[in-house]
Image (cartoon, rainbow, N blue to C red):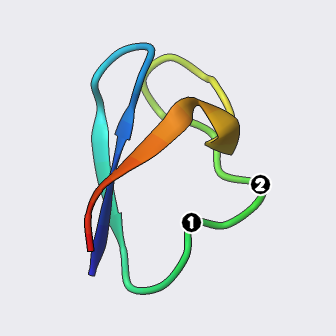
Amino acid sequence: MKKYRCIVCGHEVEFENEMPDDFICPVCGVGKDQFELIEG
């Protein structure tokens, strides 16, 4: 699993593979480009 953190609001999500290109943060609404890989 790969864990990503939103650099805007701090929300964390996990994906089995890469984050989908169309992923939107469910908390603050930013796109994939505002997430950083924190483990995986």
Residue at x 28% of width, y 23% of height: 10
Tell me if 39 is positioned left or right of 8 in this view.
left
Residue 22, numbered label: 2
Residue at x 48% of width, y 34% of height: 26
Q: Position of residue 17 (x, y in %)?
A: 48, 85
Q: Position of residue 11 (x, y in %)?
A: 29, 31
Which of the two discs, 2 and 1, sits closer to the camera? 1
Residue at x 65% of width, y 44% of height: 32
**Please, what is the three-letter code of the amino acid marked with disc 1?**
Met
Q: Position of residue 36 (x, y in %)?
A: 43, 43
Relative to 32, say whether 34 is above or below.
above
**Please, what is the three-letter code of the amino acid marked with disc 2?**
Asp
How many numbered circles does the render carry? 2
Relative to 28, say whether 14 is above or below.
below
* Residue carrying label 1: 19
Relative to 8, say whether 1 is above or below.
below
Residue at x 58% of width, y 30% of height: 34
> Considering the numbered disc 2 on the image, is that residue within a helix, a strand or a loop?
loop
Q: Position of residue 12 (x, y in %)?
A: 27, 43
Relative to 1, say whether 9 is above or below.
above
Tell me if 32 is positioned left or right of 26 in this view.
right
Quadrant of residue 3 in the image?
bottom left
